[in-house]
Amino acid sequence: MATATTSPITDYRQEWFEIEDATYLNLAGQSPMPKVAHRAVQTAIEWKKFPHHVADSAYFEIPNRIRASIAKLIGAMPEEIALTTGASTGMSAVAFGLTWKPGDEVLTAKGEFPLQYATWKPMEAREGIVMKVVAPRERFISADDFLAAMTPRTRMVSVSLVRFDNGVLLDAARIAAACHEQGALLLLDVSQCCGGMHLDVNELGADFMVCAGYKWLLSPYGTGFFWAKNEQTDKMRPGPFYWAAAEGAENFHSLAFENPKPARGARRWDMAETSNYFNFAAMDASLRFVLQFGPETVSAHNRKLIDFLFERLPKDRCVPASPLDSAHRGPYGCFTARSPEKTAELYQKLVKEKVITSLREGNIRVSPHLFNTERDIDRLITAITL
């Protein structure tokens, strides 16, 4: 079970640098790093300034701390985690690592984040698989849609746990149970929720999980992780791997091995140079900060702000574009104006008023964090009604 440490901090806004020239409600697009991560980067810069202060063990200490933090965050084991530059690395690892048969089906959702199509569509030509795009039968995609689309040839469901364009939260456990009943696998992209809400791999039932680090994990762009069950990595095809993921790589005094074997688990898919001091020093600090306040704190805080937003939206101009029931919604919410054209105009108006949101697939996405308050939502509403 994933756990987090209760934080003694009461005013979280003090943990970030104040954004004085805008109201920032776009964490799902790019998170501002907390002060503690900036301090870690400054320390890393000093290491590069005076490299004789860097011990050989430092090449492994930071990556191992990050693995441990992610494991706590998602209820996993550290050896099941690879450190990557984002979600794409893990998707490619699964695509190239599994053994496919012609006609194997990979199901994803209509309107998914482009990562899904960029991964699976080329695999049709390479391996003869079939990518099936599942459309929602009602307004939002649901587990029922995937269950209805599955056939005996379905090998994998690959989908976002929380949609990037409308915040819909899937019932992954139901999909996982249906997959496993027929020997299929579930891959979840958790980029838009990991760190912003409670996640536990055992409860979700997934076989693989990919995540970008620059959103709810409060880490730099160019960070992320790939999680895979040990039982699944044991079945993956061999391939090139980063030398520091080899058995015995920690022994810097004897690196001339001619027949390297990857350490058990997901480390073989680590990005090269996982000891990248600038990015991963910051990620290390940010993850410990996330564990300190706990994703559940973010989820509860954001639920109140998004509910407040939906209550205050001028109904003659705007409508919610996310589920009203927070149990079916991720850590943010979306809305639209009364037409696509008016929505685009309204988004530009918000930009002009320096209220920073995102325009995604015709929806205005509002993604706050602990540094936001109801005053920021009031500012957004005021900008809409000007």
Image (cartoon, helix red, strand yellow):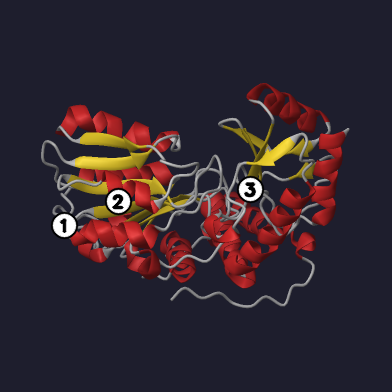
Residue 235 numbered tag:
1
Helix, strand or loop at mark 2: helix
Q: Is residue 6 visible?
A: yes
Instruction: Give the percent coordinates (x, y) of residue 233.
Output: 23, 58
Helix, strand or loop at mark 1: loop
Q: Residue at x 25, y 54 (%)?
A: 185
Residue corresponding to mark 3: 333
Could you tell which of marks 1 and 2 lies nearer the N-terminus?
Answer: 2
Q: Place residue 218 in its image quadrant.
A: bottom right
Residue 147 numbered tag:
2
Split into 4 quadrants, where in the image is the N terminus?
bottom left
Split into 4 quadrants, where in the image is the C terminus?
top right
Asked whether disc 1 touches disc 3, contact meaning CB atoms under 8 Å apart, the reply is: no
What residue type is disc 3 on?
A: Gly
Q: Place residue 205 in its image quadrant.
A: bottom left
Could you tell which of marks 2 and 3 lies nearer the N-terminus?
Answer: 2
What residue type is disc 2 on?
A: Leu
